[in-house]
């Protein structure tokens, strides 16, 4: 009898040796290897699963060197004596405690096996959508309460209504798959583990707003996702789930993947559209909204990977079933991504309202080092650093906004007590200087000046005056930038100053290792009159 | 001969992609893939084919970190500098790779074997710290495993 063994082809799993594990297991007799996506339990990757009568049992993290002993101890019979045994996969507490909706198929199916996708609820939603009017489709999204999962949390149904109502025959669906936020990987996991989920969601979006062309703008750093998506698109086309007259409905929809070119700012929707048009990724002023004048000037839906993937779940289960999850105005589930210095880093999909402490400790297993956790950055590189006193907060859009923070794309990066928060603040400015599109002066120039000013603070040069200057600069960037890059870079900087101010008052560090930067250290920068900058800062 | 090959690669990339909507990035990706960089002397060919100015094409090439105007080393090592990797000792990894190769970011070793580049997130944050060598991502990197990887590149085993 052939035994089915699952070894993920997820790029994180591959980065820690999954390909080598799969190759060695494939040499065993009577074994069929299925390269599934990852379940998102990344600290256990490479996680090998074996199909048994009781369900799938897991082992991990499995190295090539573990395979002989695993096989000796009857891995293929699902025996659980080996130290790497994890028991039934579904019973692993990290997974069992989750509410997986968007990620319900992740790690379970072979990502590009259409049959497997359909036996797990795939294309039920699309088949329902083609029996509905376009307005009914839009209403379904509104009723679900879904808000943009990319970070801005704008109600998806309202965006769709605007595109639906916009005049003109040519409309586009654009998927923002430029997941540049550090500490986030949910889009990548979704595209690699369940690409049809995204494709189905985009197809439903096209039917709802009357679009016939879609683009997935994928960051170049995700080559595995690129392969999976292209393979899935080809299969969907062959099965008449994309292309002309989809399932005889009269709807046409073509879908194409376009690669970015390593530019963080292209994750901003208007910069993304510029990039798709073949231009520099420079942010556009709004209005006009992309919903009215988007790609090539046409009405365009721009949604994140998770928003669009969730659409297929909403249409499968019904808007109400989805809206029953969550709290307040944050409906449904949020895929949180645990990263940084935690014992158990991975994807946690839960209804909104879970506390940060639960995520860090119950799921994350606390600090991975021998030092306690000290700071947590929530919501990507533009998110605030939260001190322990704030870890009790409930994770939903409004509660986090109330603390001056952002939930963003759901990334959570934990740091232990060895972190130097003045170096982190400096990095935020440095990153902004590196990735700014250059359109707005406070972002383009302010970020460089910000990094220099933090260098001076760290070097104890006019510390108090320079801290005041930094605060003033932050205010200017926030108020004088078109998009979140300049407008939110001050968030991590200000939160570091507010909650970890002691790190800015340490004995000076030598400039040679100040954040290990490629920028000029403070010693070689031109002296600038603090008063003149202050004046410039407060006058705008 | 080499000039002709370059020219041909550029013309092929244009021909294959010119009918797409917004063809410039796909064209540049294709050239970069084939030649490892986008030769400045052919910027004019691209501009002519798309009815753009040379300045516009140059602007796009220089805006994006991916596109290079100069040839890089035989292998590219990208080290993640973003927060999750920092939280797991990424800064020490950065220092170690620079020390081992004797170069800084955006530089190439004198034998032309390795170019070092920073990268801001590889989406491998649950297995930090992460680096990428050519197309392969490595997670849970230590200074020792990094040193072994570099040695294997130098020995021509990568």
Image: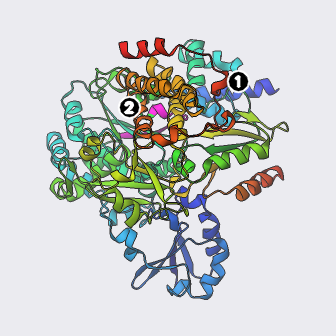
Place of residue B138 in the rendered image (x, y in percent of width and height, measured from the top left): 63, 55
Q: Chain of mark 1?
A: B
Looking at the image, residue A487 sits to the left or right of residue A310; the answer is right
In front: B20, or A384?
A384
Q: Residues within 10 Å of mark 2 (few under 14, many from 20)?
A: many
Q: Is residue A260 magenta?
A: yes
Looking at the image, residue A379 sits to the left or right of residue A62; the answer is left
As drawn, A250 above or below A323: above
Name the residue beneath numbered marker 1: B39
Place of residue A56 in the rendered image (x, y in percent of width and height, measured from the top left): 43, 78
Q: Residue at x 58, y 60 (%)?
A: A14
Q: Is residue B21 visible?
A: no
Place of residue A122 in the rendered image (x, y in percent of width and height, measured from the top left): 32, 59
Looking at the image, residue A269 sits to the left or right of residue A163; the answer is right
Dot 1 lies on which element? loop
Q: Chain of mark 2?
A: A
Q: Which disc is residue B99 wearing?
A: none
Dot 2 lies on which element? helix
CA distance for labels 1 and 2:
30 Å
Q: Is residue A285 magenta?
A: no
Given this view, does label 1 or label 2 mark the residue nearer the observer? 2
Name the residue beneath numbered marker 2: A269
């Amino acid at each position: 009898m052939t035994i089915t063994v699952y070894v993920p082809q997820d790029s994180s799993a591959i980065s820690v040796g999954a390909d080598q594990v799969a190759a060695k297991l494939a040499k065993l007799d009577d074994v069929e290897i299925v390269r599934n996506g990852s379940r998102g339990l990344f600290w256990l990757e490479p996680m090998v699963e074996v199909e048994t009568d009781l369900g799938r049992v897991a082992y991990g993290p499995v190295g090539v060197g573990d395979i002989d002993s695993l096989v000796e101890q009857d891995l293929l019979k699902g025996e659980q004596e080996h130290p790497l045994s994890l028991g039934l996969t579904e019973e692993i507490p990290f997974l069992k405690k989750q509410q997986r909706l968007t990620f319900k198929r992740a790690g379970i199916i072979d990502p590009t096996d259409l049959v497997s996708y359909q036996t797990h609820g795939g294309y039920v939603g699309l088949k329902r959508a083609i029996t509905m009017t376009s307005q009914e489709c839009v209403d379904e999204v509104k009723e679900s309460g879904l808000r943009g999962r990319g970070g801005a949390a704008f109600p998806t149904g309202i965006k769709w209504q605007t595109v639906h109502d916009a005049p003109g025959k040519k409309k586009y669906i654009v998927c923002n798959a430029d997941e540049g936020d550090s500490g986030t990987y949910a889009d990548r996991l979704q595209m690699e583990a369940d690409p049809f989920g995204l494709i189905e969601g985009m197809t439903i979006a096209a039917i709802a707003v009357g679009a016939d062309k879609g683009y997935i703008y994928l960051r170049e750093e995700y080559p595995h996702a690129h392969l999976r998506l292209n393979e899935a698109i080809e299969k969907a086309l062959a099965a008449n789930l994309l292309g002309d007259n989809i399932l005889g409905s009269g709807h046409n929809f073509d879908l194409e993947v376009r690669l970015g070119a390593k530019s963080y700012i292209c994750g901003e929707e208007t910069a993304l559209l510029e990039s798709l048009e073949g231009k520099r990724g420079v942010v556009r002023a709004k209005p006009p909204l992309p919903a009215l004048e988007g790609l090539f000037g046409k009405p365009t839906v721009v949604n994140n990977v998770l928003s669009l993937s969730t659409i297929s779940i909403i249409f499968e289960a019904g808007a109400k079933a989805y809206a029953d999850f969550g709290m307040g105005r944050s409906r449904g589930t949020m895929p949180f991504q645990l990263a940084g210095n935690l014992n158990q880093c991975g994807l946690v999909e839960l209804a909104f309202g879970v506390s940060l402490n639960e995520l860090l400790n119950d799921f994350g297993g606390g600090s991975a080092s021998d030092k306690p956790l000290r700071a947590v950055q929530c919501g990507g590189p533009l998110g605030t650093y939260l001190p322990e006193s704030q870890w009790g907060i409930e994770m939903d859009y409004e509660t986090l906004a109330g603390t001056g923070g952002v939930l963003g794309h759901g990334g959570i990066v934990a740091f232990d007590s060895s972190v130097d928060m003045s170096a982190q603040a400096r990095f935020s400015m440095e990153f902004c200087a590196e990735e700014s599109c250059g359109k707005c002066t406070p972002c383009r120039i302010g970020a460089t000046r910000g990094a220099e000013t933090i260098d001076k603070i760290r070097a104890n040069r006019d510390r108090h005056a320079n801290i005041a200057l930094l605060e003033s600069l932050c205010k200017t960037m926030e108020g004088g930038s078109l998009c979140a890059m300049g407008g939110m870079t001050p968030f991590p900087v200000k939160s570091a100053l507010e909650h970890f101010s002691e790190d800015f008052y340490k004995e000076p560090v030598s400039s040679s290792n100040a954040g290990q930067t490629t920028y000029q250290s403070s010693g070689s920068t031109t002296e600038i009159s603090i008063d003149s900058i202050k004046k410039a800062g407060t006058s705008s | 001969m080499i000039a002709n090959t370059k020219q041909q690669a550029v013309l092929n990339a244009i021909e294959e992609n010119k009918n797409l909507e917004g063809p410039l990035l796909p064209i540049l990706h294709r050239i970069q893939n084939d030649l490892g960089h986008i030769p400045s002397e052919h910027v004019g060919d691209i501009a002519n084919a798309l009815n753009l100015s040379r300045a516009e094409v140059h602007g796009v090439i220089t805006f994006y970190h991916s596109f290079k105007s100069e040839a890089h080393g035989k292998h590219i090592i990208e080290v993640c500098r973003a927060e999750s990797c920092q939280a797991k000792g990424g800064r020490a990894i950065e220092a170690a790779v620079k020390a081992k190769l004797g170069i800084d970011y955006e530089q190439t070793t004198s034998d032309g074997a390795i170019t070092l580049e920073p990268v801001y997130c590889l989406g491998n944050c649950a297995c930090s710290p992460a680096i990428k060598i050519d197309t392969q991502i490595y997670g849970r990197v230590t200074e020792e495993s990094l040193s072994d990887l570099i040695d294997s590149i130098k020995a021509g085993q990568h």
